[in-house]
Image (cartoon, rainbow, N blue to C red):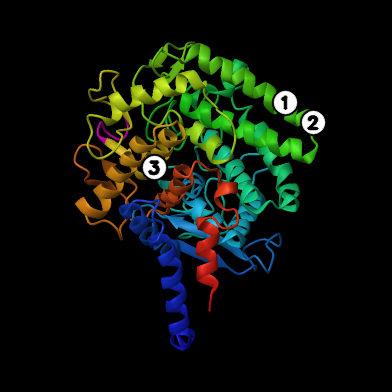
Amino acid sequence: AQFLCKEHDALLRRVLAWQEVVYSEQALPAWLREALVNILYLFPVNSFWAQARPPIGPWCRPEDGLFGLLDGIIEDPAMEPMPDSFYANAPLVYFFPDLALSTLRGYKAYTFANGAAVYIWGGVVGAAEGGYEMTAGTEIATPTPGYQTTTNGPCYVDMVDRYWQRSGDNKVLSEFYPSVKKNTTYTMSLRPEDGADGIISVPSGDVDPENRSRPPGHFLEWFEVEVWFGMTPHVGGIHLANLKVAQRMAEKMGDKEFARQCHEWFEQGSQSMEDKLWTGKYYLAYYEPKIGKKSDNVFAYQLDGEWMARFHGLSNVFRPSRLKTALQTIREACIDRWPYGAVDLARPDGSMAFGVGYGPNAYFVPESYMLAMTYIYGGEKDFGLELARRTVYSMNVLNNLTWTQPNMLRADTGDLLFGTHYVQNMMLWALPCALEGKDIATFCAPNGLVDRIIAAAQKT
């Protein structure tokens, strides 16, 4: 309080200066400029920064401390739930890379001996959905593997690469590469009995190997309440993006054998994806031929792996000739009839898909932004921007939720379904990068928007 009182004038000038950079960015629509500035309120509300002392282990550096984000802060609080931080991480890497590095070192230290990535550092979510004993409140030093094992690892690999691409620090890559390699091997071995098909599938038996308390098909990936069996383009695309990232890292590290292995896994998984999941207009939501499980619903977010690759400056995960067709099908089935977002699942004719986990009219806010960017990277800039605008309008104008930031809305009415103060909505900060047709490295380059914001904020 004394510091704020003493430095009030200087701090206010710096705040107004960096905000003015955003508000003056004429290439961005006014609604987006306003939303980008305001959504960063989530950063101070949800941030924890612990000192390097017990119960945190001796691996934690005094100069780092341990920085983490709390998500689901009212309904279902958890420290650093892996997929939520994956969504939220972009502005952290842009503006506070030292804190992002502290978090990454926490992930690395909490990786399990078998290579599985940590799901949470502690919190009630460990009991509510993961089947683990509830930790002490939101204790920052009680990691569990939780669930969603098939996508936790790719999130970790993705965030390590974001930091590396943003910083260009090869020493940090050397520090994290062994854990990336071990986790990637673990992820690609979750369904070994199915060979190439297993690379793009949920784990063996359609059950999470780190938490077998759930029935088959449930709680396997970050769309946790939907059921999944066998091969799925969502998991598959995420795994293929993971492999592209890991291959680039391996090549930089001179690990030719693992680079070759990642390329081989990618080619095998991609072939299975294109041969066994493509319907002619889109990819099946899932397909498990051994037990006759198949869903021909159109899953709006089936192409998430494509966005992951493009944000990292990598080439296509899905076959380019099919990507445009799939985006058109998704638009017709999941977006055109829904005025306020892209419904998670719909029938191919655009009618409601009943009996799905979150309901026939639900969608996740950060997923809407990710899909919008996938359209933009796919050459449909105007439509992608309009999809993002609908989401922001639903929250900030229609429902006055600027300072609430739920994670789930209704695509038919725009109304709140669930959540308050979800850091995952900071995914919005990846949108300007896509609009400029850039990846994270070029977006953070000198004289770009990120660089100009930081320069303005640092002026005294």
Q: Between 248 and 389, which is closer to the camera in this rendering?
A: 389
Of marks 1 and 3, which one's residue comes earlier in the chain? Answer: 1
Residue 19 figure quarter: bottom left
At x 27%, y 26%, the residue is: 355
The CA span between labels 3 and 2 is 36 Å
Location of residue 149 in the rendering, given as x and y in whole percent from the top left corner: 54, 36
| Residue highlighted by disc 1 | 261
Amino acid type at circle 3 is Tyr
Asked if residue 48 lies left or right of residue 61, the reply is left
* Crowdedness near tag 3: few (<14), some (14–19) or many (≥20) residues, C-alpha within 10 Å: many
Q: Which residues are magenta?
A: 356-361
Q: Name the dominant secondary structure of the magenta segment.
A: loop
| Mark carried by residue 256 | 2
Residue 446 figure quarter: bottom right
- Nearest-to-viewer mark from 1 and 3: 3
| Residue highlighted by disc 3 | 369
Location of residue 191 in the rendering, given as x and y in whole percent from the top left corner: 59, 23
CB within 8 Å, label 1 to label 2? no
